[in-house]
Amino acid sequence: MDVQLQKLIENVADHEHAAEEILLLGARAVPALADFLAGPTQPSPQARLFAVCMLDTIGTPAALVALGQSVRAHSLQSLHPQYAQAEYVVKNEALRRLARRRYLPLDELVSFALLEERLPAAAAAAA
């Protein structure tokens, strides 16, 4: 992953500046954002939520695929409770944003999110 982009994502105190930099890169930032979400979970969700927000804002097909992959990554049952709680928030937000965009294959993601992860956004998307 691009080290400079990783620092921007992780600097939760200055996400306004980070958003400007990432949005200037646009689609070129998607691989680094996707790598960040595929990488290790964190005990606090802020940086990972920011990556979700940036992928949604960029909105390219590759960005939406990365959001979908983030819902499936990191089984909550396999994580330490503190990390699982933070990742639950991240996964739920990613799914909520995909549902709002009517992302396909949403049905498969909703089924997974309901049955495996029990995400509230999955219930809302299924309704």
Image (cartoon, rainbow, N blue to C red):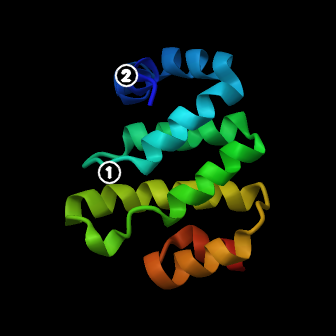
Q: Secondary structure at mark 1?
A: loop
Q: Position of residue 49 (x, y in %)?
A: 47, 43
Q: Quadrant of residue 96?
A: bottom right
Residue at screen point 61% across, 35% down = 30
Q: Secondary structure at mark 2?
A: helix
Left/right placement of residue 65 relative to residue 3 reads right
Amino acid type at mark 2: Lys
> Is residue 25 shown above or below 88?
above
For the residues bearing labels 2 and 1, Cβ distance under 8 angstroms = no
Q: Amino acid at mark 1?
A: Thr
- On screen, residue 15 above or below 84: above
Residue drawn 67% across and 53% down? 65
The crowd level at tag 1 (other Cα within 10 Å; few <14, some 14-19, many 20+) is: some
Residue highlighted by disc 1: 41
Q: Earlier in the sequence, mark 2 or mark 1?
A: 2
Give the percent coordinates (x, y) of residue 33: 52, 37
Q: Is residue 63 above or below residue 70?
A: above
Which residue was labeled with disc 2?
7
Vertical relation: 55 (above or below) 105: above
Q: Position of residue 82 (x, y in %)?
A: 22, 59
Residue 6 has which mark?
A: none
